[in-house]
Amino acid sequence: MDFELLIGIFPQVFLDGLILGFMYALIALGYTMVYGVLEFINFAHSEIFVVGAFVGVEILLTFQAAGLLELFSPFLVLLVVLLLGMLASGLLAVTVERVAYRPLRGAPRLIPLISAIGVSFFLQDAVRLVESVWRNAFNLVYPTMDTLNIRFSFTETIDVSVKSLVVIVASLLMLWGLHALVNRTRIGTAIRAVAEDQAAASLMGISVNRIISLTFLIGGAMGGAAGVLFGVQYSLINPYTGFIPGLKAFTAAVLGGIGNIPGAMLGGLVLGLLEAFAASYLSLLTGGAFGAEYKDIFAFSILILILIFRPKGLLGEVVRERA
């Protein structure tokens, strides 16, 4: 075993794991916010993430066809695309809540869960239908922007692209902004009040339906931002792209402590790092017996062990008891 190689690739693997972890964290916030307010898992969130990615690629392809990518700063273009992707996904999440979840509020928990799965399949096929009619293809590639593909080499084994730095900075800013919104504003106080007790919040003059819609809007916007950043980072998307990242983001939310915003951030980073280290080190440590294809087994095995010994997640979110 080449220990110098193991140590030499460590910084690059750590960086790749951080990028992937931030992606999972952004998606996980949508799951954890909805669960924190409604104690309900929105399994359609992975498709809301995909819609954000497709809105982003359509806008970029339109800009490219009009020659606008060469006229404006790529960072300005990316900001516009990011905001529009967040808006589209946020509004879609609000629509899904209003149509598919609100009429079922108060029903046994299994019923809205089945509704969420149905919405997930509907959105997958809706995106496929729209793209097939519009472009006669639904495997789309994000246009390349040369500035974002510039790479900086810090050492012989560490290099990072501009788009990776953009993903990290944008993720940190959005995670900080969400944390500040929930903990330092009146809107955040209202969200926390509804999460604690809807009836009491209603008696205090808080519009419960409006706050729940706002929660879906924020969670969907985070998913849309993750979709755009995912497309920029990994280029290829299709209507089924969201399934695996969505499943892993849900896992990250559970790992950190479902319903806990800092827990979603931590869970996403831990899962991303575990996956990156497994993909890079398994083959080296096992002499080629296990390769990168086993990274998911390794990451989920660690998750199972953590939840066995700490079932409430890393940050120990306490589930409320109701009479």
Image (cartoon, helix red, strand yellow):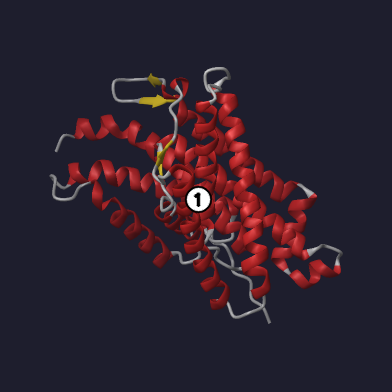
Please name the residue shown 57% across and 50% down the image: 262
Q: Where 240 sits versus 22, above or below?
A: below
Percent coordinates x, y for residue 120 in the rendering: 50, 62
The part of the image, by quadrant, that contains residue 37 is bottom right
Q: Secondary structure at mark 1?
A: helix
- How many neighbours does mark 1 have within 10 angstroms: few (below 14), some (14-19), or many (20 or more)? few
Please name the residue shown 59% across and 63% down the image: 35
Please name the residue shown 36% across and 62% down the image: 305
Number of dots carrying numbers: 1
Q: Which residue is mark 1?
A: 130
Between 8 and 275, the one nearer to me in the picture: 275
Q: Where 236 sits versus 41, above or below?
A: above
Q: Is residue 122 left or right of residue 274?
A: right
Percent coordinates x, y for residue 290 in the rendering: 18, 50
Percent coordinates x, y for residue 213 in the rendering: 70, 59
Between 218 and 314, the one nearer to me in the picture: 218
User: In this rendering, does residue 314 appear at all?
Assistant: no
Of the 4 image quadrants, the one containing the N terminus is: top left
- Furthest residue to the top? 71
Q: Amino acid at mark 1?
A: Val
Please name the residue shown 73% across and 69% down the image: 197
Of the 4 image quadrants, the one containing the C terminus is: bottom right
Percent coordinates x, y for residue 88 in the rendering: 62, 46
Q: Is residue 293 left or right of residue 212?
A: left
